[in-house]
Amino acid sequence: MTVLGIETSCDETAAAVVRGPADRQILSNTIRSQIDEHAEFGGVVPEIAARAHIEILDRIIAEAMQEAGCGWDDIDAVAATAGPGLIGGVIVGFMTAKAIAMAAGKPIVAVNHLEGHALTARLTDDLEFPFLLLLVSGGHSQFLLVRGVGDYERLGTTIDDAIGEAFDKTAKLLGLPYPGGPQVEKMAAMGDVERFKLPRPLLDRPGLDMSFAGLKTALRTQAKKLEPIDDQTVADLCAGFQRAVSAVLAARTRTALELFKARHPDAEPVIVVAGGVAANREIRQSLLTAAQEAEARFIAPPMNLCTDNAAMIAWAGIERLQLGPVDDMTLSPRPRWPLDSTSAGVLGAGK
Ligand code: ATP
Ligand code: MG
Ligand code: FE
């Protein structure tokens, strides 16, 4: 089947056409980032985001359809992010999707944005359930056991900041532009990782929870002592920060894989990383090493499918439709929508 996907939950306006599930193919994947609109404010401004989505979404959808060589008749369903995210943007995307679905006489699938991130690896790789997922993005940092579509168990989460958020805040306090993740990574490459010893929060405790706020505070304290800080110090701090985050994630991944093996002794141990922070090379490398040590398979989707995109939403729509007919025309967008409450078949339970 062929599905049009729409994503507007944050600061990317995106549309894509994906075919599957048998011959998985991304026919188009159009995206427009609003980074320039938000840069001067040092973060995403919800009102500006919603307006920008309204202005451009129709054109982005038209481009995605054209590039895929599709007319409305070639589409089997429309899938759109219905949450979680910035409500203004989600409304723009989901209502546009409903209008298209109604006009074209196609079913609509309300996709949980996090389920999009969670299932991306099944679009890019041959991957069976169950698998372990480390979701690291601007708003989330969690380990999930993915047993099937709509069957998620959260094994651990950050108790304070999300990792992407910690990267963004760290960048801001060091005077680096928004979005911070890629900037911190760039500076870290020129830094001395040994110069600053930053903490590895919560690692002395068992379980899979994580904490990143203390790390950011420790970095701020170090930076304050050395003010005004020069470029080399910024680079050294970035290197120390990135190393601490990588070490925490690698240690927790080792624990998560042990848990997975105990729970599913007959399944191949697999750890998938998803979300914008998965674009970070040092983090990818340390997760790969942790997986190799545990003799587990490691999957990281290509960078452009790790950050927000609509191909992952179209794919999640296809996965949902495999379970049976879906028509979420009466659903409302949900700003908060935990992934472990998206059980298949009762998608609208909390509407
Ligand atoms: P969510 O998916 O939780 O709703 P989001 O959609 O804003 O949040 P993504 O778009 O998946 O999150 O990821 C954006 C985050 O990823 C930002 O916080 C950004 O700083 C971070 N990020 C992007 N590239 C890198 C990188 N190379 N290194 C570290 N962090 C990065
Ligand atoms: Mg984003
Ligand atoms: Fe996201």
Image: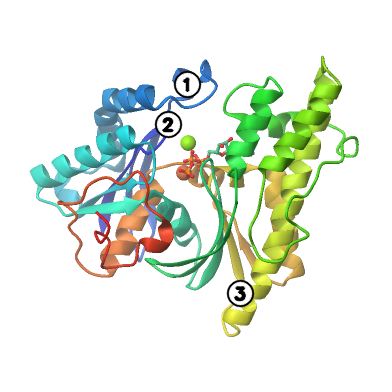
> Would you say the residues marked 2 and 1 are in contact, meaning their CB atoms lie under 8 Å apart?
yes
| Residue 9, x across and y down, in percent | 37, 39
Label 1 belongs to which residue?
Answer: 38
N-terminal label among 2 and 1: 2
For the residue pair 251 and 32, the one nearer the viewer reads as 251
Question: Which x, y percent locates residue 243?
Answer: 78, 44
**Residues under labels 3 and 2: Cα distance?**
34 Å
Q: Is residue 94 left or right of residue 45?
A: left
Of the two numbered discs 1 and 3 on the same chain, state the one appearing first in sequence: 1
Name the disc covering residue 11, or none: 2
State the residue lying farthest toward the bottom: 266
Look at the image and tell me whether residue 189 can be seen: no
- The residue wearing badge 3 is 260
Q: Secondary structure at mark 2?
A: loop
The amino acid sitting under disc 1 is His
The amino acid type found where label 2 is placed reads Asp
Give how far across and how far down residue 216 sits, in percent.
71, 36
Residue 273 drawn above or below residue 104: below
Q: Amino acid at mark 3?
A: Phe
Do tag 3 and tag 2 residues touch (Cβ < 8 Å)? no
Look at 43% across and 52% down and name the residue there: 114
Which residue does the image show at 40% across and 34% down from the upper left?
A: 31
Q: Say whether mark 2 is within 8 Å of ligand 2.
A: yes
